[in-house]
Image: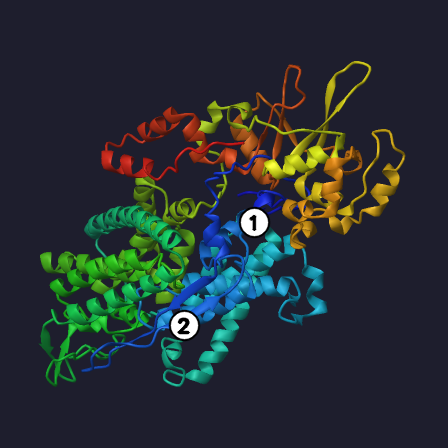
Amino acid sequence: MAVAPMMTPFLEIGPAALDFLKSSSYCSCLSLPASFPWLPPCRALTTSWWELRISRSRIGTGNYNRIQAYEVYTVHGKQKVRCCYLEVKAYLNGIDVPDILAPRALFVKVFGSIGSVAGGLDAGKQGPLAHTGACIAALLSQGGSEDHHLSWGWLRSVKNNKDKRDLVTCGAAAGVAAAFRAPVGGVLFALEEVTSWWRNLLLWRVFFSTALVAVVLRTASSFCGDTNCGLYGHGGLIMYSIGNFSVKFRLAELVPIVMLGLFGGLMGSLFTLCNSKIVKFYSAWHTKHGPAVKILHGILISLITSACTIGLSWLGACTACSLETCPNQGIAIRSARFMCPEGHYNDLATLFLSSNDDIVRNLFSVGTGSKFRYSSLVIYLVSSYTLALVTYGTPVPSGLFLPMIMSGATYGRLVGMAVKSWHGGFAELDEGLYAVLGAASFLGGCLRVTVSVCVILLELTNNLLMLPLTMLVLLISKTTGDLINEGIYDQLLRVKRLPFLQESPEPYMMNLTAFDVCSRQLVTLNAIEKVKHILDVLQGTRHNCFPVMSIDLSSQKTSFQGIILRSHLLALLKSKNCLPTKSSEKKVAIQESLPCSDSGKPALLKMVTIKVVEKSSFAERARSEETFIDLQPFVNTSPYTVVDSMCLASAFTLFRSLGLRHLCVVPRVECGLPIVGMLTRHDFLPDHIFRKFPHLRRKRWQSLHLRVPFLKKAVESDEPPESSRL
């Protein structure tokens, strides 16, 4: 587990922060090519952002489905709001996506998730609630929102990057705990999946936050009961309770359980591969045709979901039942009649026309082995699996956790029914318990998360006797999935082109050095530099950090003085204080006239860019006159450096553990250049390394001893095209 650094700067992405990519308040990085592959197109960032919210009414017994009015929310601004749990995870890794935690993102997320979940789309609520909690925490960490005239002075004490990251982690964990009413599961999910740096103090804070969530939920449920608050009151704190059902199994039943884990790993890997392709297509489609296509996309997904719900329900058969035998009693919820005569129910319509939570309760129900037919479960499995694939990536707030539980529980129940029918005395586990294991296998094979998923499922079902089998299934499914491809979160981070750094270096980094992958085309500045040259450099490059050199007049040797940030140069140009000659005595006055608040990240917040400086009269005068700026008082003279022969794995560990955004690479043997390159976050990414050393990708696959050509071809096709670097 990585140790939290003292400070973690953030990588700014967006049109206003384009020139500050990978920069921070105390360090920066160097290279940002014009075709930098990790940036979305500028056109998509500068247009207004549209979000479609779809509300589709559920069918009551004997009623037809209908599509309600569409709600379209438009958020105007210079930057596109990225409402996704993955961006929160990237933020906690050190990437600051603009507006991801803004108040307007919170507003859109809350009302959008209400529409998408209540409307019946195949979408979960875990992701939206985790993002909602992170937005609330970020709002509190900065003392409110000054833009919306909501600020509290007593919260300013936590207005720093470190405490803000901690609060965002607590908010995400609280959202997960609220989604599943699983406080301990929320803590473990934050530890295992959300945050990149963990420490004991953060553990206490997250535990305190989820405990408060549990208290609030328990208090609210005591006032609601089962019917006063709609679907919220169902289940209490145990959403999918299977009661104190005895969990007994024979040793021979471990065979189908192991097969269930293998099948879950394969299905999860296939889901990950297909969904990454679909999301990539959606992203290109939205970027090419603009915001209006998102509205069409949402309408199309809603129509497809409604058509499947209505049309496929007709394929179910009517089953006769009575008050004594009809499976409406106990844990199972009310069955849907759907065009059946009185005293009959449609098992397929029961799955399609219920809310997502009620679907899971039906599939997890024990003692109801004859409630569903094989054909109905197969039809629902194919449709729910397909709808989950095409729905995630639609411009509506959606999560993956609940759709995976529904699909996994469906094939888990199928396996349980098959085992029971094959030999009645062979199986003692109930079909509902097989459904729980199926949900665990699909979650493990897709998310590649084990401990937190295990605890969440135990808190959801309230049956600790399922712990050994759940652990076994999760370990098998995760191992199977890891042998084929990456988890879905890692795949989607690559699709979204977020430069996420994993916790540990890849094995192939042991065979590379820092010089092999670093950026070598450096743009340097002199200690006392011409203003005209600084303007040309800032105008012609997008570099965010410049090495500063000085020449010894006696020996004519060039020495490396340190680095200076682009934001510092802009602040110096904004001050309009220059030296008429290189030997002027005005240096101290310039240094004293430049406030500290005009450098670093505040310059970004004030929108000081090179275009603003170029339009000033000072820039015109500086280009016509010979004026200089002394950079020495503003240079960071102690940047982190590594020698060019250092192992890349060691450089990666240093880079990530300290939360850096650049590493200066200096020569081990004097070669005439005091600095030979720089390492940035981009240089450690597998895509960049594989483009330079293609044989490493082949060796990576050969080490697995897998002969699956189509998987290898699919993974390699995910690599972005090679782009030139400055």
Question: Which residue occupies the extreme right position in the image?
Answer: 585
Q: Secondary structure at mark 1?
A: loop
Specify the label residue 198 is tagged with: 1
Q: Amino acid at mark 2?
A: Ile
In front: 257, or 403? 403
- Vertical relation: 546 (above or below) 591: above
Dot 2, how many residues are within 10 Å of its Cα: few (below 14), some (14-19), or many (20+)? some
Q: Is residue 40 left or right of residue 488?
A: right
Neighbor class of circle 1 (other Cα within 10 Å; few <14, some 14-19, many 20+) is some
Disc 1 versus disc 2: nearer the observer = 2
Q: Position of residue 692 (x, y in %)?
A: 44, 26
Q: Is residue 310 above or below residue 582?
A: below
Front in this rendered view, residue 90 or 509: 90
Q: Quadrant of residue 119?
A: bottom left
- Label 2: element kind: helix
Write down the residue under mark 2: 114
* Horizontal arrangement in the rendering, residue 419 relative to residue 455 (left or right): left
* Percent of width and height locating residue 356: 31, 69
Q: Quadrant of residue 164?
A: bottom right
**Alpha carbons under labels 1 and 2: distance apart:** 32 Å
